[in-house]
Image (cartoon, rainbow, N blue to C red):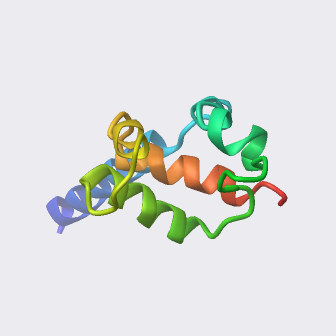
Amino acid sequence: MKQLALSTLAAGLLALAGSASAQVDPLQVRSWAAACANCHGTAGRAQPGNEPLAGVNKDEMVKKLKDFKSGAKPATIMHQLSKGYSDEQLDAIAGWFAAQKK
């Protein structure tokens, strides 16, 4: 019984450690998102002719980014840019843009 309690405690601590490392500094995410400003505008508010990202649904944006990264969605530059980020980073960037006002 004591061994089971220790195993459960160890598993819980590992889970907490994993979730703590999954948190990303919001300033870091904002810095990653700033790389998108050349085409998509500051804070995702694009000039006419470019796709705005501010306020876009996060799940849809993540899907697009992962499709660019895998090559499933054709692109001129996005497939190259998206490959520079992990899936977790793309998720964080999409969340940042989704939280911006249109």
Q: Which quadrant of the figure has residue 98?
A: bottom right
Q: Which quadrant of the figure has residue 6?
A: bottom left
Residue 20, position in %: x, y?
A: 48, 43
Report the front residue among 77 and 30: 77
Q: How many marks?
A: 0
Is residue 18 in view from this perspective?
yes
Is residue 10 in view from this perspective?
no
Q: Which quadrant of the figure has residue 84?
A: top left
| Residue 1 versus residue 17 in the image, above or below | below
Residue 66, position in %: x, y?
A: 36, 57
> What's the residue at 34%, 62% (across, down)?
73
Residue 38, position in %: x, y?
A: 65, 32
Classify the position of the C terminus by image quarter. bottom right
Q: In screen coordinates, is 45 left or right of 20?
A: right
Residue 95, position in %: x, y?
A: 61, 56
Report the front residue among 5 and 84: 84
Report the front residue among 58 and 24: 58
| Residue 73 versus residue 60 in the image, above or below | above
Q: In screen coordinates, is 19 left or right of 47?
A: left
> What's the residue at 67%, 52% (across, down)?
97
> What's the residue at 26%, 55% (across, down)?
71
